[in-house]
Amino acid sequence: MTQHNDKTPPLILTPHDWHDYRLLDSGAGRKLEIVKNYRFIRPEPQALWQPHLDPQIWENDIDGEFISGAEEGGKWALSKNLPEQWSCQFENIRFFAMPTPFRHFGFFPEQSSHWQWCAEHIKKHRAKTNTPPRILNLFGYTGIASLHAAKAGAEVTHVDASKKATTLAFANRDHANMHDAPIRYITEDARSFCAREARRGRRYHGIILDPPKYGRGTKGEVWRMEDDIAPLLKTLKNLLADEPLFIVLTSYAIRASFLALHHLLADACAELGGSVQSGELAIQEHRHDADHERGRRIGQAIFARWQSNPD
Ligand SMILES: C[S@@+](CC[C@H](N)C(=O)[O-])C[C@H]1O[C@@H](n2cnc3c(N)ncnc32)[C@H](O)[C@@H]1O
């Protein structure tokens, strides 16, 4: 049986090892961030507290601010000198950053905790079997998780229904100089792809999925997290290899606590043994380089992850 009970403590994971992203301060409903050499202010409704830094520091040399508004939720006010996109790096992987209409920067720094956790499993598998594990990255978008998994030694299948998202994933792959990496990019509805893979008998050692609250497949199929996630996890169970490593499920913007994902994943993996952890992916204020000077944390997403072997 899967090990989980009501005493399992939540994990609040914060990103480490970033040089090209920093949350400098937060408060009064906003956050002040540095992405490579550029400074941005974005709305952060969770920042109910007061900022630590002077208002002058907040407003000085700002390269862009996302202004919330009625018009499609808001828009960026950007400095004229800001390039359309620029290069960022995490560990040894380069990718593009840009201010998107969805108010993010084309990458999600809080996800690096998952990338590193998956990489540990991938490396252990390689050391044990001398073969690359197969990893499925569903709803893969920017593809940074796919690049990171491939760098760690996996063969990756990356699936996203949006052509635009896959174009960005290709651009990131090329920018990372990973044209020859063993990654298959598929533009398709995640459910149709998984159902077909199950029929074909394809199996994966690890599955990463970050489904949206609401989305559409390539043929207009509607994806609704509340209705569609449990059936998808059922299909995913049939896609697991005989000695599976992990499933990582992350969710943004749904009205649920991490406990909902915990119990959902524990249900889906009940017959597999192993254990489920859950909690939040948070970013953390970081004004100076010293690690002990890290500050307040802001939850960005909830997650649950299953692993076959304990840490
Ligand atoms: C929350 S984003 C994932 C972000 C990703 N974890 C990252 O770090 O880049 C959700 C993605 O799901 C895709 N999507 C939406 N509906 C889909 C569907 N039915 N099948 C496959 N992908 C879908 C969207 O195009 C979008 O790229």
Image (spheres, helix red, strand yellow):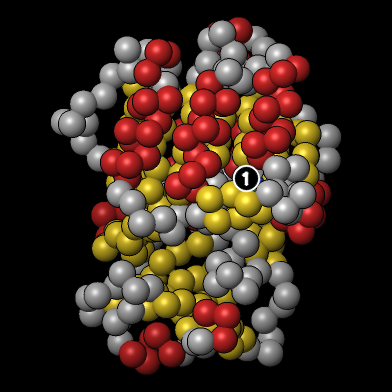
**Is the CB of mark 1 within 8 Å of ligand 1?**
yes
Q: Position of residue 251 (x, y in %)?
A: 45, 49
Q: Quadrant of the C terminus?
A: top left
Counting labels gives 1
Looking at the image, the residue that sits furthest to the left is 7
Tell me what residue is drawn at x 42 percent, y 77 percent.
43
Tell me what residue is drawn at x 51 percent, y 26 percent.
234
Q: Position of residue 70 (x, y in %)?
A: 51, 87
Secondary structure under the numbered disc 1 in the rendered image: loop
Relative to residue 23, is residue 245 drawn left or right?
A: right
Viewer can see residue 153: no
Q: Position of residue 127 (x, y in %)?
A: 57, 13
Who is closer to the viewer here, 234 or 33?
234
User: In this figure, which residue is indicated by the disc labeled 1?
Assistant: 139
Q: Quadrant of residue 208?
A: top right
Tell me what residue is drawn at x 69 percent, y 60 percent.
96
Q: Quadrant of the N terminus?
A: top left
Relative to residue 60, is residue 141 drawn left or right?
A: right
Who is closer to the viewer here, 3 or 238?
238
Tell me what residue is drawn at x 67 percent, y 30 percent.
194
Relative to residue 259, is residue 264 drawn left or right?
A: right
Q: Quadrant of residue 78?
A: bottom right
Q: Amino acid at mark 1?
A: Phe
Looking at the image, the residue that sits furthest to the right is 180
230 over 287 or under it: above or below: above
Q: Position of residue 5 (x, y in %)?
A: 21, 26
